[in-house]
Image (cartoon, grey):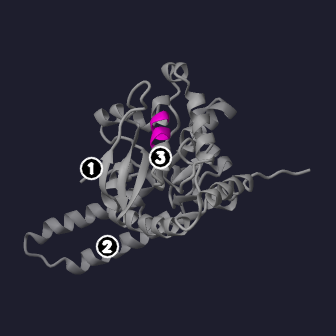
């Protein structure tokens, strides 16, 4: 079980949970505290529901980054069977910030690809904090083309602050790798379902997010830049992330109004980090429903529908 980690706005809940612990310790002395504990637990549930139904955009961004939030490998364990990870881009190397491979979803063979973050320091460094290099996107594209060859649906999980901006990444063609993925995914002749599960950061997210259906977890975010990055550019002050988040409008409730995503997936009260199994169950139901619909379409219908979908996102004023 992951070590509990609480956000600032969850502190009132933490204080009540500590009181329950204290009462439970008293119970070992023979005191009957069931009624008191029950009352506090009910209060905690009501408080958690109130807090998480009224999150600001900045608070939502914090929840989307929660260290205990389920990552791609967690969803693979909870939602898929027979996963076989495939490695490397057959050009430079293997990028651990993107994982992918063959699996079965409700018995149907699929190709699963997603960003992977880490929880402790060692894993964070190994996964490069979920920020892929060009070889990560080229690996993803290799797996997508393999899926197309064998007529397998592609399911992607998006959760990254953005593509890695290091010198080595630029030297190996970061921009070209992302741009090529956008082009190839637009014309891929097999179903693509995208799940934004945490941070959907800029082109680093979009490089595996061109799909027929785009699903987004309730407390995830999707934007062209992080709030802190936006604040650093606009006001030369990265500490104004909260102000930038309000301007960016990166939450699922904001994004669905623009037609960028198709469906918002409910999270358990308190966020996905509170209950991985319930989150995976909700997401799996939505995936199954959308995949069943896409399986009925021909490759030509898929490509045409995807083209129309992304064309319809643009807005202009004369």
114 on left or right of 203: left
In the rendered image, which residue does mark 1 sit on? 3
User: Residue 146 or 129: which is nearer the viewer?
Assistant: 146
- Which quadrant of the rendered structure holds the N terminus? bottom left
- Residue at left 7%, top 75%? 30
Q: Secondary structure at mark 1?
A: loop
Q: Which mark is residue 40?
A: 2
Mark 2 crowd level (few <14, some 14–19, many ≥20, 10 Å Cα): some
* Residue 143 included in the magenta stretch of the image: yes
Count how many numbered circles sit on residues in the image: 3
Q: Which mark is residue 159?
A: 3
Magenta stretch, residue numbers: 138-144
230 on left or right of 50: right
Mark 3 crowd level (few <14, some 14–19, many ≥20, 10 Å Cα): many
Q: Nearer the viewer, mark 3 or mark 1?
A: 3
Is label 2 in contact with label 3 (beta carbons under 8 Å)?
A: no
The secondary structure making up most of the magenta span is: helix
Residue lying furthest left in this view?
29
Mark 1 crowd level (few <14, some 14–19, many ≥20, 10 Å Cα): few
- Residue at left 50%, top 49%? 148
User: Residue 238 or 302: which is nearer the viewer?
Assistant: 302
Residue 5: % across, % down? 34, 50
How far is disc 3 from disc 1 in space, using C-alphas?
21 Å
Q: Nearer the viewer, mark 2 or mark 1?
A: 1
How far is disc 2 from disc 1 in space, using C-alphas?
23 Å
Residue lying furthest bottom in this view?
35
How far is disc 2 from disc 3 in space, using C-alphas?
35 Å
From what the image shows, is residue 10 above or below residue 86?
Answer: below
From what the image shows, is residue 91 above or below residue 68?
Answer: above
Disc on the earlier residue, 2 or 3: 2
From what the image shows, is residue 283 above or below residue 220?
Answer: below
């Amino acid at each position: 079980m992951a070590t509990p980690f609480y956000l600032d706005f969850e502190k009132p809940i933490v204080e009540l949970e500590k009181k329950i612990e204290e009462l439970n310790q008293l119970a070992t002395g023979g005191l009957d505290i069931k009624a008191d504990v029950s009352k506090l637990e009910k209060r905690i549930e009501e408080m958690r529901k109130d807090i998480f139904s009224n999150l600001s955009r900045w608070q939502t961004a914090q929840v989307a980054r929660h260290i205990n939030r389920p990552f791609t490998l967690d969803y693979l364990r909870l939602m898929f069977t027979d996963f076989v990870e495939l490695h490397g881009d057959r050009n430079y190397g293997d990028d651990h910030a993107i994982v992918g491979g063959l699996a079965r979803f409700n018995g149907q063979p699929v190709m699963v690809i997603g960003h992977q973050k880490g929880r402790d320091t060692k894993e964070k460094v190994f996964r490069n904090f979920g920020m892929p290099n060009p070889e990560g996107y080229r690996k993803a594209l290799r797996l997508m083309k393999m899926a197309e060859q064998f007529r397998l649906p592609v399911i992607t999980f998006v959760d990254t602050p953005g593509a890695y901006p290091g010198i080595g990444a630029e030297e190996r063609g970061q921009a070209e790798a992302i741009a090529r993925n956008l082009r190839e995914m637009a014309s891929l002749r097999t179903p693509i379902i995208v799940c934004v599960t945490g941070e959907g950061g800029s082109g680093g997210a979009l490089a595996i997010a061109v799909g027929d259906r785009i699903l987004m977890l309730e407390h995830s975010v999707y934007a062209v830049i992080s709030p802190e990055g936006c604040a650093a550019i606009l006001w030369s002050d990265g500490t104004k992330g909260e102000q930038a988040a309000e301007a960016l409008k990166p939450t699922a409730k904001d994004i669905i109004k623009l037609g960028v995503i198709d469906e918002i997936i409910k999270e358990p009260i308190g966020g996905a980090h509170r209950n991985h199994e319930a989150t995976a169950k909700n997401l799996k139901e939505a995936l199954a429903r959308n995949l069943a619909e896409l399986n009925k379409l021909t490759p030509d219908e898929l490509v045409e529908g995807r083209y129309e979908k992304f064309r319809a996102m643009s807005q202009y004023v004369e």
